[in-house]
Amino acid sequence: LQQLAERIHAPVYLQSTARGSLEYDHPLLGNRTRSSAFAGADLVLGLGVDWDFRTGYGQKINGQAKVIQVDADDTKIGWNRSAHLGIVADPKALVGQLVSLADLIEVDEGGRSFTRELMEEEGGKRAEAEALAANDGSPVFPERFAQEVSAFFGSDSILAVDGGDIVSTTARWLRINEPTTLLDPGPFGTLGTGPPFALAAKILNPDRRVGIIFGDGGFGFNGMEYDTFVRLGLPVIGVIGNDGAWSNIKTIHQMFYPERVVAADLGVRPYHAMVEGLGGYGEFVDDPAEIRPALERAEASGKPALVNVHIAEVPRASSNYAQ
């Protein structure tokens, strides 16, 4: 995929287990400009992509653009978004064939300029995120949480993500350099997948650091699997971005029914104490400077661990489906 992108000078956007197909710092990898790419593209190549809620169901693609969709499952072709050309094939095999033909593909200056503009926008948005992450306030600002958690886990961990807004915020920061090392809830955004995914990952990769990034709502679904981690002696490291609310849902309530927000507040609960009670390591943090040290203490404990970070309740773009 990297060879193809470099040959045709095309921006690449990855999701789910495909993250890591290009390294995090690759100059053609976009993390924050996919909507702009969809809006301005004249050709979109979807490789095993589900046109689901994560991609706006494919409806944000420029109406004049040609769409080529490649999937090994023929039922996915045209799912939610029609394709001008649907190809039932293994995306990896097809990319290999395209690389062998890439020298025949001419990229005009307009295409190169489009890619440059996207990557300049990417740099600007990354700078904006870094400015937000400089916030030293308590509760912890979500971008700061994402920055600190990403710095701890680095590029050699296997990470399961289990949440809504906190996952969409943090995923942009995670330095995923190897495919299938970011395990996300998939096309339905299913909560509760973090612990079972991490369980399998740690059993199969006992010598690798395995972590879970939770929202507080996501933790509520399968948090009791820490009992399994303890019984099996699996030192998985979890961290919660805990804003005490179903924030993804609460934002929608506030937009459309501001006078009656229903069952959207959870409270900042001591989930770390539950893990301690099961025999693991738990710690509560509300100071951004203590997030990494707390995660380091969690890892040093040698136990299944949970660092419960109190984050600020901040509306985020991932919740605003009206845009």
Image (cartoon, helix red, strand yellow):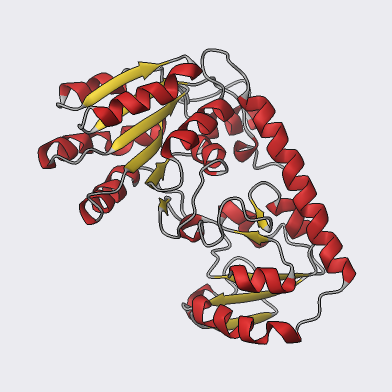
Residue 131 visible in the displayed image: yes
Label count reads 0
Q: Quick one: 227 or 294, which is closer to the camera?
A: 294
On screen, residue 135 versus residue 226, left or right, reads right
Q: Residue at x 88, y 67 (%)?
A: 110
On screen, residue 150 versus residue 302, left or right, reads right
Q: Position of residue 54 (x, y in %)?
A: 57, 52
Residue farthest to the left, as pictured: 231
Q: Height in image: 142 above or below 155?
A: above
On screen, residue 136 versus residue 219, left or right, reads right
> On the rendered image, what quadrant is the N terminus found in?
bottom right
Q: Quick one: 247 or 277, which is closer to the camera?
A: 277
Residue 187 visible in the displayed image: no
Q: Residue at x 57, y 53 (%)?
A: 53
Q: Position of residue 322 (x, y in %)?
A: 69, 41
Q: Height in image: 46 above or below 251?
A: below
Q: Position of residue 285 (x, y in %)?
A: 40, 17
On screen, residue 171 versus residue 31, left or right, reads left
Q: Position of residue 2 (x, y in %)?
A: 60, 67
> On the rendered image, what quadrant is the C terminus found in?
top right
Q: Residue at x 51, y 15 (%)?
A: 139
Q: Residue at x 68, y 55 (%)?
A: 27
